[in-house]
Amino acid sequence: MIYEYWFAKIKGVSCVKKKKLREYFKTAEAIYYIEEIKLQASGILTEKEIEKVIEAKSQADLKKQWEQLQDKKIHFVPYFSKAYPERLHDIPSPPYALYVKGALPDMSKPTVSIVGARNCTHYGETEALEYGERLAENGVNIVSGMARGVDGAGQRGALNVGGRTYAVLGCGVDVCYPKEHWGLYQDILKDGGIISEQLPGSPPFASYFPARNRIISGLSDIVLVIEAREKSGSLITADQALEQGKEVFALPGPVTSLLSQGCHRLIDQGAGILITPEELLETMGIILSKCRQNNLPEKKVLESTENMVYSCVDLFPKGLQQLSEETKLAPEILLEHLITLELQGVVKEISKNYYVKTR
């Protein structure tokens, strides 16, 4: 396997050509020891690419690098390995090899990717969390990119209910990006996995992220876009999913929200509309394994005025003045009820005098 690792590491030769060369010579070890004239005779590589292969043979400490990989508990999964995910075999330009910490998703189980804006709204974060929880508790694998915002929220939702989630990174699997997701990174590894086609230690270069999106969609049956601007990485994932023959669903939002324009564009082009997690599960043919827990407070718990205030608060922020006009309550009285609702955990002040429902 050390020769396969050596071959996968070669830069300057595309995944497609590596695959062809490996099929032609049968093993990476044969390529390592092959004469230059035979590489030329194969007709697969350009002269420049042949130089890259020859140059790679002079790498020092290959055995030491391989041992370091084992020490870090990083699994090397080349294209020809039985462990390589079958779904990725069918996508255009599959990665030649994957590096994995933890586990790869069980491809016999339904798998959904949840992607969206890094700078998402409270609405987007809440919905991503909700879909992550509801899908995961019904046996669906959740795949995403562990990015800030929607990605992290969807994966945290899966973890909240003991589900399995898998992060595909645009850097090495031993690099936590973003750094503030170190806790999420560690939690994912308990039952899920961290996946990348980039070499361990690789920093998060911008050019790596569009490429990793094809792996996110490739591992999934369905791609959910929660919030996205009209030009965003999430739409790249959606486009790649459609190219791979996968279903795409998008979450609608306010027509005035820039973070919903990308979703609305997808819906206009024929993407499915996300209404509730339950409806999505029914579309997937999954029978709910658990009764839906009512996340709204029971009316008997709240006083009638608090119920009225609660009903006026939304998933989108509303200011004290607007709520005062809707409830017909004086601001000071309204504020008392909002504080009570905050203490009960059903309302949250996200900025000075602006409130949202927590779920």
Image (tube, grey):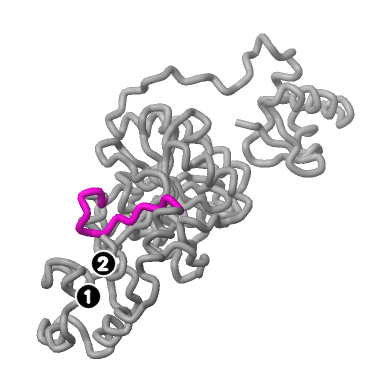
Q: Disc 2 on helix, strand or loop? A: helix
| Location of residue 77 (image quadrant) | bottom left
Question: Does residue 244 lie above or below 296 as drawn?
Answer: below
Q: Are marks 2 and 1 in contact (CB under 8 Å)?
A: yes
358 relative to 94 in the view: left or right: right
Q: Please tell me which residue lies in front, 68 or 205.
A: 68
Residue 114 position within the rendered picture, expressed as x and y whole percent measured from the top left: 44, 46
Q: Residues within 10 Å of mark 2 (few under 14, many from 20)?
A: some
145 relative to 217 in the view: left or right: right
Q: Which residue is mark 1?
A: 32
Q: Which residue is mark 2?
A: 3
In three-dimensional space, the C-alpha distance between marks 2 and 1, rounded to whole angstroms, equals 7 Å
Q: Disc 1 on helix, strand or loop? A: helix
Residue 268 circle label: none
Question: Does residue 167 lie above or below 5 as drawn?
Answer: above
301 relative to 42 in the view: left or right: right
Q: Residue at x 32, y 29 (%)?
A: 282
Residue 133 position within the rendered picture, expressed as x and y whole percent measured from the top left: 48, 32
Residue 238 position within the rendered picture, expressed as x and y whole percent measured from the top left: 37, 56
Q: Residue at x 35, y 76 (%)?
A: 11
Looking at the rendered structure, the kind of residue marked 1 is Tyr
Q: Residues within 10 Å of mark 1 (few under 14, many from 20)?
A: some
Where are the magenta residues, as a range? 72-84
